[in-house]
Image (cartoon, rainbow, N blue to C red):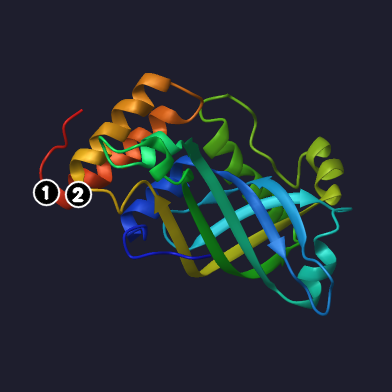
Amino acid sequence: MLIHPWDEADEGEWKRFLAEHDFGQLIASGRDRDLPVVVPTHFVFDGEQTVWLHLARPNPVWGPLGENPRALITVVDDYVYATSRWQAAPGSPAELGVPTSYYATVQVACDVRIVDDPQEKAAILNRQLGHFEPGSGRTPVSDTHDSDRRLLPGIRGLELTVTDIRAKFKYAGTKDAAHRREIAARLAERGGRSDEAARAHLLRRLEAEEGAPAAR
């Protein structure tokens, strides 16, 4: 992934993003395969260096992970299309602007440990329940409960240790402050699926550069 200096995320930025975006793709390349196996999945990130998740036992990802215990988790969100008009400098013709995408993405390189111990699998499920279903009242998963003992053999767990991060927040970082504020206004006016999230990223990054609250 190409990351320009003006798009690179700092540690706090990518950690906040992963805390709020807990669904991505697990990519396992294995050894000597034509293509990697790519699995969409929810996950739990501890905020520092560990990710947990579980997958069904028949999932094809186990083959490549057994061959090479390395994987990549990728998360992409808050993406929008930036039109030619938006990209063109204020006051210049729209045809001078090159349309592009604004987006946030984090790529997490990991060492992989496959978890088959029933107690450890139950612990992973309980972490996920605590994250995704807080206060639901659901009974914790246990390898001693009859119903859970029947379900646990059908899944395998993964404990992923983060070894490297590639994070990119592409939000008009090459534009001057006035141009970026104009783009922020356009996003607010359009009001599409991710326009407000993209606008928030753009203004937050502008504010960090200027060291003072950005105009909203």
Q: Is residue 34 above or below residue 88?
A: below
Left or right: residue 148 compared with residue 126 = right
Left or right: residue 38 compared with residue 12 = right
Kind of residue indicated by mark 1? Gly
Q: Residues within 10 Å of mark 1 (few under 14, many from 20)?
A: few
Percent x, y of residue 4: 38, 64
Mark 1 vs mark 2, CA separation in Å: 5 Å
The answer to whether mark 1 and mark 2 are in CB contact below 8 A is: yes
* Camera-nearest residue between 187 and 156: 187
Identify residue for label 2: 208
| Residue 6 quadrant | bottom left
Q: Residue at x 28, y 49 (%)?
A: 175
User: Tag 2, which secondary structure?
Assistant: helix
User: Tag 1, which secondary structure?
Assistant: loop
Which residue is farthest right?
Answer: 58
Percent x, y of residue 23: 60, 43
Kind of residue indicated by mark 2? Ala
Q: Residue at x 43, y 40 (%)?
A: 95
* Camera-nearest residue between 111 and 11: 11
Identify residue for label 1: 211
